[in-house]
Amino acid sequence: MKIKNIKHLGLLCFLALAIGAVATACMDGDWEEPSYSDGAPFGNNDITEEGLVSIEELIAKYPNVFESTDRNVQITENLKIKGRVTGNDLGGNIYKQFFIQDDTRALCIAVNQNGLNGYLAEGQEVLIDLRGLYIGGYRQMPELGQPYNGNSIGRMSKDVWATHFKLIGDPQPEALQPVDFSAVMSNKNANCGRLVVLRGASFANANGRTAFAGKNATTSGGNYVNQNVTYNGQNVIIRTSTYADFAAMALPYNEATKSPAKCNITGIASRFGNDWQIMIRKPSDIEVIEN
């Protein structure tokens, strides 16, 4: 019996070595990078650029939908827009929507889907077929989606969205250059939704303990907390979701001087009614320049 067991053991060892050799041979081979030359495995690869307009031209076609009272209008023309993704749900502060911009303006795209960052990474260029979709102002923020609660604009279903977009090339985050917010303030409407940076800003409530949107924070309606930053002598709202990955992170504070630290803050310039606000995308959007 012992000899028989030893033979069985030897056979098992031989099989294990054989399988390991095959696996090693596979691992030693050259793996090719995924290629989307025949089209990405997401969206609708049949969309063409026929009827392509800029985001500015699109918004100009519907001048009355971005009012204090929410409105939406269905796009019936054969129109397309193309832009790069500037912000998504990667950091948890942007929920079921993402932002794109071209050389002219920016736009919010609302989709009832989680994990949009999985295929709509920052810097990804996307072509959108607009016919059949709706455009409107969610609290005066230009948004693409579907009707919600009557005249309001809300999220389109993920199935509708899947037939209306096409990915172009690979993500190029280096192509995203935020605009200095000082240049935006003179014409906020034209820059609504654009990626911006506030240089040398500081959080008014920073004390080494107060968080962006901690458990005990007072929400500013919904599940968001507004923090004020001082920038060029003015107050600017930084809007943070209580579900953001950095919600419990302390506001940048200078321990040496016992005062709010100077920072460069990158984010999406958006609006909620009469409130103009910056939405930080992820923790690395905060660059402390004074410790």
Image: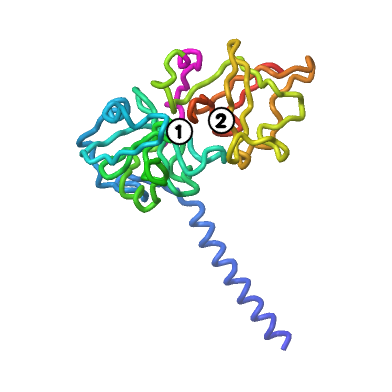
Q: Is residue 40 above or below residue 277?
A: below
Q: Nearer the viewer, residue 243 or 103?
A: 243
User: Relative to residue 134, is residue 226 drawn left or right?
Assistant: right
Residue 33 shows in this picture = no
| Amino acid type at image mark 2 | Ile
Most extreme residue toward the bottom, as rendered? 1
Dot 2, how many residues are within 10 Å of its Cα: few (below 14), some (14-19), or many (20+)? many
Say which mark, if any, is on residue 139: 1
**Disc 2: which residue:** 280
| Amino acid type at image mark 1 | Arg
Q: Gap in Å between the C-alphas at discs 1 and 2? A: 19 Å
Q: How is the image coloured?
A: rainbow
Q: Nearer the viewer, mark 1 or mark 2?
A: 1
Q: Is residue 217 above or below residue 26?
A: above
On the image, the x and y values in percent for residue 233 come to: 60, 10
User: Relative to residue 36, is residue 51 drawn left or right?
Assistant: left
Dot 1, how many residues are within 10 Å of its Cα: few (below 14), some (14-19), or many (20+)? many
* Residue drawn 58% across the image and 31% down it: 239
Please tell me whether mark 2 sits on a helix, a strand or a loop: loop
Mark 2 or mark 1, which is nearer the start of the sequence?
Answer: 1
Q: Is residue 284 above or below residue 35?
A: above
On the image, the x and y values in percent for residue 135 come to: 34, 37
Where is residue 126, by image quadrant? top left
Q: Which residues are magenta?
A: 171-185
Where is residue 262, by image quadrant? top right
